[in-house]
Amino acid sequence: MSQRIYSLAYLSSHRCTPAQAIGVAAQTGYHFVGLRLWPNAAGAPQQQLLGQPEALRETLAAQRDTGVGVFDLEIIRIGETFDPHTWDALYDAGAALQAKAILVAGDDPDEARLTDHYARLCEVMKPFGMSADLEFMPWTAVKDAKSALRIVQGAGMPANAGILVDALHFGRSTTTLNDIRAIPRELLHYAQICDAQAGLNFSTEQMIHTARCERLLPGDGNIDMQGLFDALPADLPVSVEVVNFRREANTSVQDWAAECLAKSRPFVQA
């Protein structure tokens, strides 16, 4: 059986520059990193690289020195007004870094318009060699796996379309294991692992706080991690995405990355 591929997600290495994240990944057993080169909200944290040639050179050098690749870039949000060329610099950076995917969030409550815009995004991204992976999150307009699949199918199943499954959002949405199994294999490029308290009784503010500040290490919550990763393809790359400001305050980035990977492995190894 082929070795499972692990990526160190941005949220697990948010204290690092892109080049530093690659170094940490190499030291702690990851094959790839995820980078947040575009913030998830105006003024929110991000890693600085776009428009900074020296940072790009450092990151490319770190890739060459370590063999660690860039798996995904964050983040494109599809709102009510949407111009895919807003992110041209992100596509260029992704191509330079040989990234595989860009993470996409859907915020537009008009599903028909969101679907059209997603199709347009896939079209614009096609020359750059990356997939557009739509992540369902229960506080967005794409609340569950069924919604994500409906949008991607409505967009005509572009060749570079994708659906991103995050264990946190699986555990806090109405998504079932059968919904996960129903996602066509060609739409799955990677999945994100972390833990939390599962349930549908959290406010939007609570869900966002957990997602951005207080995820749990796999096994420390009660999300059905084993069921989820058994339902996903056995060769699917896994992005380890565990941010916990309180826990991280007492540990180095390297030790945190290593612990996150060690706690993830039991749930995703065959």
Image (spheres, helix red, strand yellow):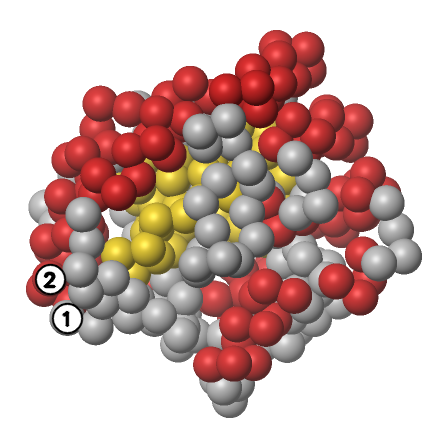
Residue 29: x and y in percent read 74, 30
Q: In this view, does 169 lie above or below 248?
A: below
Q: Answer yes or no: do the residues labelled 2 and 1 have beta carbons within 8 Å?
A: yes
Label 2: which secondary element: helix
Image quarter of residue 106: bottom left
> For the N terminus, which image quadrant?
top right
The amino acid on which the numbered mark 1 sits, given as a three-letter code, is Asp
Q: In this view, does 92 lie to the left or right of 232?
A: left
Q: Foreground: 89 or 20?
A: 89
Identify residue for label 2: 113
Tell me if I can see residue 247 in this picture: yes
Q: In this view, does 75 lie to the left or right of 166?
A: left
Image quarter of residue 173: bottom left
Label 1: which secondary element: loop
The amino acid on which the numbered mark 2 sits, given as a three-letter code, is Arg
Q: In this view, does 172 lie above or below 225?
A: below
Taking the view exactly as shown, the residue that stands out farthest to the right is 250
Residue 227 disc label:
none
The residue that appears at 41% across and 26% down in the rendered structure is: 93
Q: Foreground: 157 or 125?
A: 125
Q: Foreground: 134 or 165?
A: 134
Q: Is residue 251 above or below residue 87?
A: below
Q: Residues within 10 Å of mark 1 (few under 14, many from 20)?
A: few
Residue 110 disc label:
1
Q: Disc 2 and disc 1: Cα gap in Å?
A: 5 Å
Q: Foreground: 23 or 151?
A: 23
Residue 25: x and y in percent read 70, 31
Taking the view exactly as shown, the residue that stands out farthest to the bottom is 201
Residue 204: x and y in percent read 47, 81
The residue that appears at 75% across and 67% down in the rendered structure is: 220
Tell me if I can see residue 159 in this picture: no
The residue that appears at 61% across and 32% down in the rendered structure is: 18
